[in-house]
Protein backbone atom coordinates (compact mmCIF):
# COMPACT_ATOMS: atom_id res chain seq x y z
CA UNK A 1 0.00 0.00 0.00
CA UNK A 2 2.88 2.37 0.62
CA UNK A 3 3.28 3.21 -3.06
CA UNK A 4 -0.06 5.06 -2.81
CA UNK A 5 1.05 7.23 0.13
CA UNK A 6 2.31 10.68 -0.99
CA UNK A 7 6.02 11.45 -0.56
CA UNK A 8 6.83 7.86 0.42
CA UNK A 9 9.27 6.22 -1.94
CA UNK A 10 7.90 3.11 -3.67
CA UNK A 11 9.84 0.05 -4.68
CA UNK A 12 11.21 0.03 -8.27
CA UNK A 13 8.90 -1.21 -10.99
CA UNK A 14 9.93 -3.32 -13.98
CA UNK A 15 7.47 -3.61 -16.87
CA UNK A 16 7.60 -6.99 -18.60
CA UNK A 17 6.58 -7.24 -22.27
CA UNK A 18 5.82 -10.78 -23.43
CA UNK A 19 6.94 -11.20 -27.06
CA UNK A 20 5.94 -14.80 -27.62
CA UNK A 21 5.07 -16.43 -30.95
CA UNK A 22 5.65 -15.95 -34.65
CA UNK A 23 6.04 -12.46 -36.10
CA UNK A 24 3.46 -11.67 -38.76
CA UNK A 25 1.46 -8.67 -39.97
CA UNK A 26 -2.17 -8.64 -38.89
CA UNK A 27 -1.86 -11.80 -36.79
CA UNK A 28 -3.81 -11.21 -33.59
CA UNK A 29 -2.24 -14.21 -31.89
CA UNK A 30 1.27 -13.41 -33.05
CA UNK A 31 3.64 -10.47 -32.87
CA UNK A 32 3.05 -7.40 -35.02
CA UNK A 33 3.37 -3.66 -34.57
CA UNK A 34 -0.40 -3.21 -34.78
CA UNK A 35 -1.01 -5.82 -32.08
CA UNK A 36 1.74 -4.62 -29.75
CA UNK A 37 1.76 -0.84 -30.24
CA UNK A 38 -0.52 -0.06 -27.29
CA UNK A 39 1.06 -2.83 -25.20
CA UNK A 40 4.53 -1.34 -25.62
CA UNK A 41 3.34 2.23 -25.05
CA UNK A 42 1.62 1.18 -21.83
CA UNK A 43 4.65 -0.76 -20.60
CA UNK A 44 6.86 2.32 -20.87
CA UNK A 45 4.39 4.80 -19.39
CA UNK A 46 2.25 3.11 -16.74
CA UNK A 47 3.66 3.43 -13.24
CA UNK A 48 6.92 5.11 -14.30
CA UNK A 49 8.94 1.90 -14.61
CA UNK A 50 12.59 1.79 -13.64
CA UNK A 51 13.23 -0.61 -16.52
CA UNK A 52 11.49 -2.66 -19.19
CA UNK A 53 12.19 -6.39 -19.57
CA UNK A 54 11.44 -8.19 -22.83
CA UNK A 55 10.44 -11.82 -22.38
CA UNK A 56 11.16 -13.29 -25.83
CA UNK A 57 10.22 -16.67 -27.24
CA UNK A 58 9.99 -16.29 -31.02
CA UNK A 59 11.28 -18.25 -34.02
CA UNK A 60 10.96 -15.17 -36.24
CA UNK A 61 8.73 -14.26 -39.15
CA UNK A 62 8.15 -10.96 -40.93
CA UNK A 63 11.31 -8.81 -41.15
CA UNK A 64 9.24 -5.63 -41.48
CA UNK A 65 7.15 -6.32 -38.37
CA UNK A 66 10.32 -7.28 -36.48
CA UNK A 67 11.85 -3.92 -37.41
CA UNK A 68 8.71 -1.95 -36.55
CA UNK A 69 8.29 -3.51 -33.11
CA UNK A 70 11.99 -3.19 -32.26
CA UNK A 71 12.06 0.43 -33.46
CA UNK A 72 9.04 1.30 -31.30
CA UNK A 73 10.75 -0.18 -28.25
CA UNK A 74 13.97 1.75 -28.91
CA UNK A 75 12.13 5.03 -29.56
CA UNK A 76 10.26 4.83 -26.27
CA UNK A 77 13.36 3.70 -24.38
CA UNK A 78 15.18 6.82 -25.54
CA UNK A 79 12.23 9.16 -24.99
CA UNK A 80 11.53 7.86 -21.48
CA UNK A 81 15.21 7.23 -20.68
CA UNK A 82 14.37 3.70 -19.54
CA UNK A 83 16.77 0.77 -19.68
CA UNK A 84 15.60 -2.27 -21.69
CA UNK A 85 16.70 -5.81 -20.82
CA UNK A 86 15.97 -8.74 -23.16
CA UNK A 87 15.52 -12.30 -21.87
CA UNK A 88 15.40 -15.25 -24.25
CA UNK A 89 13.38 -18.31 -23.30
CA UNK A 90 13.38 -21.22 -25.80
CA UNK A 91 14.33 -19.28 -28.89
CA UNK A 92 15.09 -15.83 -30.27
CA UNK A 93 16.02 -16.62 -33.84
CA UNK A 94 15.79 -14.67 -37.08
CA UNK A 95 13.15 -11.98 -36.44
CA UNK A 96 13.05 -13.09 -32.81
CA UNK A 97 16.71 -12.18 -32.48
CA UNK A 98 15.99 -8.84 -34.20
CA UNK A 99 13.57 -8.17 -31.31
CA UNK A 100 16.15 -9.26 -28.72
CA UNK A 101 18.56 -6.67 -30.10
CA UNK A 102 16.10 -3.98 -29.01
CA UNK A 103 17.41 -4.65 -25.51
CA UNK A 104 20.40 -2.81 -24.08
CA UNK A 105 21.56 -6.23 -22.98
CA UNK A 106 20.49 -9.78 -23.77
CA UNK A 107 20.34 -12.67 -21.32
CA UNK A 108 19.71 -16.29 -22.24
CA UNK A 109 19.27 -19.73 -20.77
CA UNK A 110 22.25 -22.01 -21.57
CA UNK A 111 19.92 -24.09 -23.77
CA UNK A 112 18.15 -21.20 -25.53
CA UNK A 113 18.52 -20.94 -29.30
CA UNK A 114 19.80 -17.62 -30.67
CA UNK A 115 20.97 -16.28 -34.01
CA UNK A 116 19.73 -17.33 -37.45
CA UNK A 117 20.69 -13.94 -38.86
CA UNK A 118 19.55 -14.59 -42.40
CA UNK A 119 16.56 -14.53 -44.75
CA UNK A 120 14.62 -17.50 -46.06
CA UNK A 121 11.88 -18.04 -48.62
CA UNK A 122 10.33 -21.48 -49.12
CA UNK A 123 7.62 -22.79 -51.40
CA UNK A 124 6.66 -25.83 -53.50
CA UNK A 125 6.52 -26.64 -57.21
CA UNK A 126 3.47 -28.48 -58.58
CA UNK A 127 4.25 -28.57 -62.31
CA UNK A 128 4.70 -32.33 -62.70
CA UNK A 129 1.82 -33.11 -60.34
CA UNK A 130 -0.53 -30.99 -62.45
CA UNK A 131 0.60 -32.74 -65.61
CA UNK A 132 -0.06 -36.16 -64.07
CA UNK A 133 -3.60 -35.33 -63.04
CA UNK A 134 -4.36 -33.45 -66.27
CA UNK A 135 -4.87 -29.95 -64.86
CA UNK A 136 -4.14 -26.96 -67.09
CA UNK A 137 -3.00 -23.71 -65.45
CA UNK A 138 -4.48 -20.53 -67.01
CA UNK A 139 -3.02 -17.20 -65.89
CA UNK A 140 -3.27 -13.89 -67.75
CA UNK A 141 -1.24 -10.87 -66.63
CA UNK A 142 -0.41 -7.34 -67.71
CA UNK A 143 3.31 -7.27 -67.00
CA UNK A 144 5.59 -10.21 -67.70
CA UNK A 145 6.82 -10.46 -64.12
CA UNK A 146 3.42 -10.28 -62.44
CA UNK A 147 3.32 -14.05 -61.83
CA UNK A 148 6.91 -14.33 -60.61
CA UNK A 149 7.68 -17.60 -58.76
CA UNK A 150 4.32 -19.12 -59.65
CA UNK A 151 4.46 -22.63 -58.09
CA UNK A 152 2.34 -24.03 -60.93
CA UNK A 153 4.82 -23.27 -63.69
CA UNK A 154 8.48 -24.21 -64.22
CA UNK A 155 10.91 -22.13 -62.16
CA UNK A 156 12.72 -19.40 -64.10
CA UNK A 157 16.32 -18.51 -63.26
CA UNK A 158 15.58 -14.80 -63.58
CA UNK A 159 12.78 -15.12 -61.00
CA UNK A 160 15.12 -16.82 -58.55
CA UNK A 161 17.80 -14.17 -59.03
CA UNK A 162 15.27 -11.39 -58.44
CA UNK A 163 14.16 -13.07 -55.21
CA UNK A 164 17.77 -13.41 -54.08
CA UNK A 165 18.35 -9.71 -54.76
CA UNK A 166 15.47 -8.91 -52.41
CA UNK A 167 16.78 -11.36 -49.81
CA UNK A 168 20.25 -9.80 -49.97
CA UNK A 169 18.80 -6.34 -49.29
CA UNK A 170 16.80 -7.60 -46.30
CA UNK A 171 19.79 -9.57 -45.02
CA UNK A 172 21.99 -6.47 -45.22
CA UNK A 173 19.43 -4.50 -43.17
CA UNK A 174 19.35 -7.29 -40.58
CA UNK A 175 23.15 -7.33 -40.32
CA UNK A 176 23.27 -3.53 -39.99
CA UNK A 177 20.71 -3.69 -37.16
CA UNK A 178 22.64 -6.34 -35.25
CA UNK A 179 25.96 -4.53 -35.67
CA UNK A 180 24.44 -1.21 -34.62
CA UNK A 181 22.93 -2.70 -31.47
CA UNK A 182 25.67 -5.17 -30.46
CA UNK A 183 28.72 -3.21 -31.66
CA UNK A 184 32.11 -4.46 -30.54
CA UNK A 185 30.50 -7.10 -28.33
CA UNK A 186 30.23 -9.29 -31.43
CA UNK A 187 32.97 -11.84 -31.96
CA UNK A 188 34.91 -12.09 -35.21
CA UNK A 189 33.29 -15.25 -36.54
CA UNK A 190 32.76 -16.04 -40.22
CA UNK A 191 29.49 -17.86 -39.52
CA UNK A 192 27.87 -15.08 -37.51
CA UNK A 193 25.72 -13.75 -40.36
CA UNK A 194 25.24 -16.94 -42.40
CA UNK A 195 21.88 -17.84 -40.87
CA UNK A 196 23.49 -20.31 -38.44
CA UNK A 197 22.11 -20.54 -34.90
CA UNK A 198 23.57 -21.58 -31.57
CA UNK A 199 22.71 -22.42 -27.98
CA UNK A 200 22.52 -19.58 -25.50
CA UNK A 201 25.85 -20.53 -23.93
CA UNK A 202 27.62 -20.39 -27.31
CA UNK A 203 25.72 -17.21 -28.14
CA UNK A 204 27.33 -15.51 -25.14
CA UNK A 205 30.79 -16.53 -26.43
CA UNK A 206 29.94 -15.06 -29.84
CA UNK A 207 28.64 -11.80 -28.39
CA UNK A 208 25.08 -12.45 -29.50
CA UNK A 209 24.11 -12.31 -25.82
CA UNK A 210 25.65 -10.76 -22.72
CA UNK A 211 25.18 -13.49 -20.17
CA UNK A 212 23.27 -16.38 -18.72
CA UNK A 213 20.31 -15.28 -16.65
CA UNK A 214 16.57 -15.51 -16.12
CA UNK A 215 14.23 -12.54 -15.89
CA UNK A 216 13.10 -12.42 -12.26
CA UNK A 217 16.42 -13.19 -10.51
CA UNK A 218 18.36 -10.90 -12.84
CA UNK A 219 15.98 -8.01 -12.27
CA UNK A 220 16.20 -8.57 -8.50
CA UNK A 221 19.97 -8.56 -8.79
CA UNK A 222 19.91 -5.23 -10.64
CA UNK A 223 17.00 -3.44 -8.93
CA UNK A 224 16.72 -5.06 -5.51
CA UNK A 225 14.81 -7.94 -3.96
CA UNK A 226 11.69 -5.83 -3.53
CA UNK A 227 11.38 -4.93 -7.21
CA UNK A 228 7.81 -5.04 -8.51
CA UNK A 229 6.75 -6.51 -11.88
CA UNK A 230 3.96 -5.49 -14.23
CA UNK A 231 3.36 -7.90 -17.12
CA UNK A 232 2.08 -6.56 -20.45
CA UNK A 233 0.80 -8.50 -23.45
CA UNK A 234 -2.06 -8.44 -25.98
CA UNK A 235 -5.45 -9.47 -24.63
CA UNK A 236 -8.09 -11.35 -26.57
CA UNK A 237 -11.74 -10.53 -26.10
CA UNK A 238 -14.28 -13.30 -25.59
CA UNK A 239 -15.98 -12.78 -28.96
CA UNK A 240 -12.67 -12.96 -30.83
CA UNK A 241 -12.43 -16.65 -29.91
CA UNK A 242 -15.28 -17.56 -32.26
CA UNK A 243 -15.87 -17.78 -35.99
CA UNK A 244 -13.18 -16.67 -38.41
CA UNK A 245 -10.78 -15.77 -35.59
CA UNK A 246 -10.62 -19.42 -34.53
CA UNK A 247 -9.52 -20.41 -38.02
CA UNK A 248 -6.95 -17.59 -38.05
CA UNK A 249 -5.57 -18.83 -34.73
CA UNK A 250 -5.34 -22.40 -36.05
CA UNK A 251 -3.50 -21.23 -39.16
CA UNK A 252 -1.10 -19.11 -37.11
CA UNK A 253 -0.54 -22.03 -34.76
CA UNK A 254 0.47 -24.28 -37.65
CA UNK A 255 2.84 -21.63 -38.98
CA UNK A 256 4.40 -21.20 -35.54
CA UNK A 257 4.91 -24.96 -35.13
CA UNK A 258 6.68 -25.08 -38.48
CA UNK A 259 8.94 -22.16 -37.53
CA UNK A 260 9.78 -23.56 -34.09
CA UNK A 261 10.48 -26.97 -35.68
CA UNK A 262 13.32 -25.42 -37.71
CA UNK A 263 15.21 -25.06 -34.43
CA UNK A 264 14.41 -28.50 -33.07
CA UNK A 265 11.49 -27.19 -30.99
CA UNK A 266 7.82 -28.03 -31.15
Image (tube, rainbow, N blue to C red):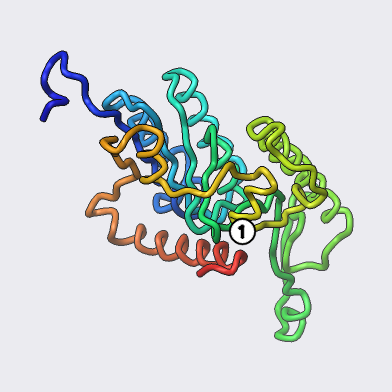
Q: Nearer the viewer, residue 28 or 247?
A: 28
Name the residue: 75% across, 47% down: 193
Residue plotted at (50% across, 59% down): 90
Residue at image mark 1: 199
Image-based side of 92 in relation to 117, left or right: left
Q: In the visual, does 258 lie left or right of 1?
A: right
Pick the residue in front: 220 or 175.
220
Q: Quadrant of residue 52?
A: top left
Q: Residues within 10 Å of mark 1 (few under 14, many from 20)?
A: some
Total numbered circles: 1
Q: Relative to 30, is 231 on the left or the right?
A: left
Q: Is residue 227 above or below residue 253?
A: above
Q: Does the image show residue 93?
A: yes
Percent position of residue 229, x then y: 29, 39
- Most foreground residue, 200 or 77: 200
Question: Where 256 sits versus 74, above or below?
Answer: below
Q: In screen coordinates, is 236 left or right of 170?
A: left
Of 69 and 74, the residue lying toward us? 74
Q: Which residue sits at x=50%, y=24%?
A: 75
Q: Position of residue 82 (x, y in %)?
A: 43, 24
Residue 197: percent from left, percent from top: 67, 57
Amino acid sequence: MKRFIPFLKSEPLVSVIRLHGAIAAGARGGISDATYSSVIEKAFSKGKPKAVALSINSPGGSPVQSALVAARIRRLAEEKEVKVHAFVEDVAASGGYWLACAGDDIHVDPSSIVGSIGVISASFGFVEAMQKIGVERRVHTAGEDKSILDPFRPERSEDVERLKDIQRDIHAAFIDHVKARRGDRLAEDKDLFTGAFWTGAKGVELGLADGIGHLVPKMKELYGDKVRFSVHGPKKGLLSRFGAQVMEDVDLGLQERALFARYGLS
